[in-house]
Image (cartoon, rainbow, N blue to C red):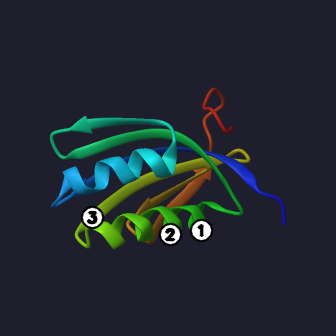
Amino acid sequence: MTDIDFRLVAEVSSDSPGAIGPLLEQLVGGTVTATPEGFHVDARMRGADARSLNRFLLSALRRVERRTRLRAEWTGNGETHRFFDYVPKGSRPASPGQPGA
């Protein structure tokens, strides 16, 4: 199985944003912007599928702060996959102008 390039757009919130912020920036290597609720992330990651990337990211963040929440959209191969924490919330075709479409 080959790896796929995914664009990640996510909202991350935590009871301890100061603890997860530096790790989040290191893991995603994209734009991480502080918000009143936590962080907004816009990045690119490469992996086998959206579910495994989502699990990797949330598991790493929860090792630092257990009460971390992730609302994510992963777009790759013309499809957008949405997740709330580990739970898939649906897939749809990516919008024509959207990166990863």
The answer to whether residue 5 is above or below residue 83 is: above
Q: Are marks 1 and 3 in contact (CB under 8 Å)?
A: no
Spatial CA span between label 1 and label 3: 18 Å
Element type at mark 1: helix
Which residue was labeled with disc 2? Answer: 55
| Residue at the right extreme of this rendering | 1
Give the residue type that dot 2 points to: Arg
Q: Look at 43% across and 71% down and name the residue there.
A: 59
Camera-side residue of 8 and 88: 8
Can you say which quadrant of the picture contains the N terminus?
A: bottom right
Q: Look at 50% across and 69% down and name the residue there.
A: 55
Question: x and y percent of residue 82 in the render?
Answer: 48, 56
Question: x and y percent of residue 80 in the render?
Answer: 58, 49
Give the residue type that dot 3 points to: Thr
Spatial CA span between label 2 and label 3: 13 Å
Other-residue count near label 1 (Cα within 10 Å), few / some / many at <14 / 14–19 / ≥20: few
Q: Are marks 1 and 2 in contact (CB under 8 Å)?
A: yes
User: Which mark, residue 9?
Assistant: none
Which residue was labeled with disc 3? Answer: 68
Q: Look at 24% across and 56% down and name the residue there.
A: 19
The answer to whether residue 54 is above or below residue 93 is: below
Sequence-first disc among 2 and 3: 2
Q: Look at 52% across and 67% down and name the residue there.
A: 56
In the displayed structure image, the side of residue 93 where residue 85 appears, left or right: left
Element type at mark 3: strand
Sequence-first disc among 1 and 3: 1
Can you say which quadrant of the picture contains the C terminus?
A: top right
Which residue was labeled with disc 1? Answer: 52
